[in-house]
Image (cartoon, grey):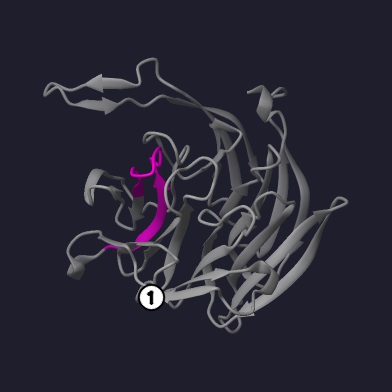
Amino acid sequence: MDDAPQLLEYETQSVSFVPHDTKWIPTSARFVAIGVYPLNSTGALAVYSLKQGKLETLAMHEKLQGLKCGTFGASAMAERHLATGDYRGVLSVWDLETADVPLYSVQAHESIVNAIDGCGRQSSSCGAPELVTGGRDGFMRVWDTRVAKSVATLASGDQDGAQECWTVCFGNARSGSDRCVVGGYDNGDVKMFDLRTNSIRWETKCHSGVVNVQFDGDDCAPVYFWQGRFLPQNRDLLMTCGGNGGLNLYKYHTSLSKEATKADRRQYGTSGTVELLNSWVVSTRPFVSMDWSSDREGLCTFGCLDQTVRVYVVTGTNEC
C-alpha cells in the first residue's frame, strides 16, 4: 500500500471530558468538541483552532447537562450557529461567540438526544433550514427553529415497544419540496421517511444496532453506507471508525447498472462494491465521532473515548 492514501497525525490533545462529537466550523480552521464531564455529568463545549502546527483552545463552556451530539447543517455560513442535543432531551442552538445562553431551546425528547442532523443551509441541499433529532424515547422529530413545536414526529412503531433511535440523517434534498430522513435503531431497524408524503419510503433490518447512517450527499437520490463519513470533496471515498481504535478508508465503485427491475416491474437501486484503500489502528479505545473539513481536503477531526480530540491529515485523496 505504498501508493495508498496515508494518515498523518497533526495533533492530539487530552481533554477533561468525554468527547461525544466533533464538528468543523464551516469556512474556518476551527472545530468544536462537545461531551460530558465524567465527575459531575455537566456538559462541555470546547472550541479549538489549528494555528502554526498546534491545536489551540479558544473557548471552553460548561453546560448544565451533558452534550451528546451537534451539527452546523441548518445554519447559514455567515452565522455558523451550532445545534446540540443533550442528556435531558433538550435541543439548543448556540452562537459560539456568546455561548452562555442558547439562541433557541426546546424540549425535544423525554430523555437523551442521541443524534442530530441539519439540512437546508449548505450549498449541497435545497429547501428550508431544518433539524432532525433522534432520541432514546424512540422518536425522530423534525424542527424549524422559527417555531417552538416540531414540524414532524416520526415513530419507530408502537409506542409501547418503541426502539431507541441511535442515529439520524437528512437526504434526497434535490428540490424545495423533496426531503427524506433516515433513522437507525438499537434493534437493527433502518427506516427512511419521506417528509413530503409523510410515509415510510424504505426500510430494512440489520443484524445488530445501527449507530451511524449517512447519505453520500444531501442532494442525491438514496445511496447508503452504514458506519462512515464521506469525504465532501470526493463522495466515492469514506472513512469508518472502529471500536478497536482503527480507521479504515474505502473507495466505493458504482455498479454499471444503477437500477434494476423486479418481477412486478418495480425499480430498485443496485449496490456497487467497496475497496479498502488503507487501514490504521491509532488508539486502544473506540472513536465515537469524526468529521471531515469541507474547506481542506483530507483534513479530519476525531473524538475518542480515551478522552482525546485528534486532528489528522489523509494524503493522496485527490489521486484515488
Residue 61 location, quadrant = bottom right
- According to the image, label 1 marks what residue? 111
Q: Residue furthest right?
A: 52
| Front in this rendered view, residue 98 or 269 | 98
Q: In this view, does 5 lie above or below 105?
A: above
Residue 251 visible somewhere in the drawing = yes
Provide residue 82's location: percent of width, then percent of height: 58, 63
- Dot 1: few (<14), some (14–19), or many (≥20) neighbours within 10 Å? some
Q: Which residue is drawn at 50% across and 56% down?
A: 74
Q: Which residue is drawn at 64% across and 70% down?
A: 45
Residue 283 in magenta? no
Q: Residue at x 51, y 63 (%)?
A: 69
Tally the marks: 1
Q: Give the range drawn in magenta.
A: 163-181
Q: In this view, does 167 lie above or below 202?
A: below
Provide residue 285's location: percent of width, then percent of height: 60, 57
| Front in this rendered view, residue 198 or 320 | 198
Residue 237 location, quadrant = top right
The N terminus appears in which quarter of the rendering?
top right
Q: Is residue 271 above or below residue 239?
A: above
Q: Is residue 154 above or below residue 250?
A: below
Provide residue 33's location: percent of width, then percent of height: 64, 63
Residue 18 location, quadrant = bottom right
> Disc 1 residue type?
Ser
Side of 72 where 170 appears, left or right? left
The C terminus appears in which quarter of the rendering?
top right
Residue 245 visible somewhere in the drawing = no
Q: Which residue is drawn at 62% across and 52% down?
A: 77
* Element assignment for label 1: loop
Provide residue 60's location: percent of width, then percent of height: 71, 73
Q: Residue furthest top?
A: 256
Residue 170 in magenta? yes
